[in-house]
Image (spheres, rainbow, N blue to C red):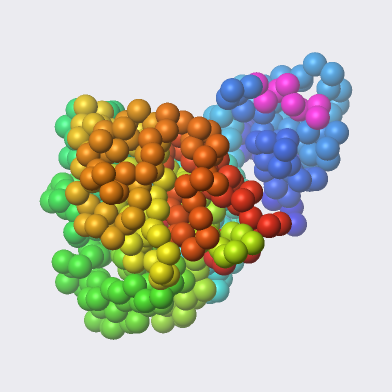
Amino acid sequence: MTLWTSHDAATATGGTTPCAWTVDGISIDTRTLQPGDLFVALQAARDGHDFVGQALANGAGAALVTHVPDGVAADAPLLIVADVQKALEDLGAAARARTKAKVVAVTGSVGKTSTKEMLAGMLADQGRTHAAVASYNNHWGVPLTLARMPVETEFAVIEIGMNHPGEIAPLARQARPDVAMITTVAAVHLEAFDDGLAGIAREKAAILEGLSPKGTAVLNADVDTAPVLADIAAQYDLAQIHWFGATASHCRLNHVALQGEATVAEVQLLGRTHSLHIQSLGAHFAMNALGALACVDALGADVARAVDSLALWSPVKGRGARFDVTLPDGKISVLDDSYNANPTSVGAALSVLAASPGTGRRIAFLGDMGELGPQEIALHQGLSTHDAVATIDQIHCIGPLMRSLFDALSAEKQGNWYSTSAEAVTILTAVVQPGDIVLIKGSLYMQMARVVDGIREMGEGSATQKTDLNK
């Protein structure tokens, strides 16, 4: 199915093209490019123009460029523009304008990707649904997601992230959501904000700047900065605000429990009671699901059907996925939460580890949490007092910041301290044994996925996946 014609793309971007072409997808990476894609020559670590020839040879339908690259014919299928990033944003804006889709945008310090995936799964059962892949939530990820949106889309789910002040508002204005959700406000990217959590709350609330007229805000009532969110929301002409959480009145989490390898909850959603079943452990999943269901209602979709669809959802690799690794004399159960970390998400992951069924040892490999500013040492040390630590047998700490947690742990809880994840991998066979339940978590730059891969390689053949379907 054609996504863009050369005429429509040129009209959207103000670009020129030497010949007519059509594309049915968009790619920014030759390694994942599919035949018929428009290759976007972004400038990042490498200049995408260096790969245009390869992209066309691999079947790209066209390439978005600022000039004809060396080695590429002048009459090749190109869209030539003044600025590739700006042109990608223009394509995204045009795609948003030409569709009648109802759009929901999700931001928050924790839980953006898992909530986005929940929404995508629930809405896909009720209409043609388009959603961001992976964590495409930044200055190129949001316009790329929008530009990939087919005109026939009925529901779209856009994830919006940030590292610094001023990033969310322009992305929200591009997405123009009908519903905007803030999952939570937590100590993430603190070093970029002089006024701490209040500053983070204001930045998250900037998603409301992009709401379409009479849009709906879905906000977390349980965060300490809820008054900040409320003050900012009051500045907009919103159709309604759905507050969700254990302290909310209309979208309330009445009860949540961890049973076996599932999370069950009872929620009160706008006057109706629903029982939720989630195929993964974590009270935070139930909270995110409640907010997601409030979004479903605001979009005009069927909440009861969405609850049924939710029962089929489970986290993706690196964001709470669970799998077993088979050894000659038993198995190791792995909780792969290696994609990223902050104090809130690490605490939630420790609670999941503590509640995981099984009689074996509960072991955590925790890597440094980045971008926490002057409080970074205290925030790492503070994990030692988390309630879940009492029922965890051993915590291995990785990185210079996690040394502070290691030193704060009691002797019986201390595993080992390693400077890098690569160092930790070398001793896995000595510290992990059959029957263990192992959590791996840390900020992305710590490369904690190496530890996950190291445990996989301990197994006989390939690991048996249990749930690999974002936190």
In which quadrant of the rendered view does residue 255 lie?
bottom left
Say which residue appears at 54% left-offset and 54% top-offset: 317
Q: Vertically, is 291 above or below 194?
A: below
Q: Vertically, is 322 above or below 252?
A: above
Which residue is nearer to you in this view: 42 or 100? 42
Quadrant where the N terminus lies? bottom right
* Dominant secondary structure of the residues highlighted in magenta in the image: helix
Say which residue appears at 43% left-offset and 53% top-offset: 439
In which quadrant of the rendered view does residue 450 lie?
top right
Task: Give the x, y percent position of residue 285.
Answer: 37, 64
Q: Describe residue 188's horizontal placement relative to residue 170 as left or right.
A: left
Q: Is residue 250 visible?
A: yes
Which residue of the protein is positioned furthest toward the top in this rendering? 70
| Part of the protein shown in magenta | 47-54
Q: Is residue 178 visible?
A: no
Task: Give the x, y percent position of residue 309.
Answer: 49, 75
- Number of dots carrying numbers: 0
Q: Vertically, is 19 above or below 1?
A: above
Q: Describe residue 352's horizontal placement relative to residue 194 as left or right.
A: right
Task: Give the x, y percent position of residue 174.
Answer: 45, 42
Quadrant where the C terminus lies? bottom left
Q: Describe residue 137's horizontal placement relative to residue 463 as left or right.
A: left
In which quadrant of the rendered view does residue 86 lie?
top right
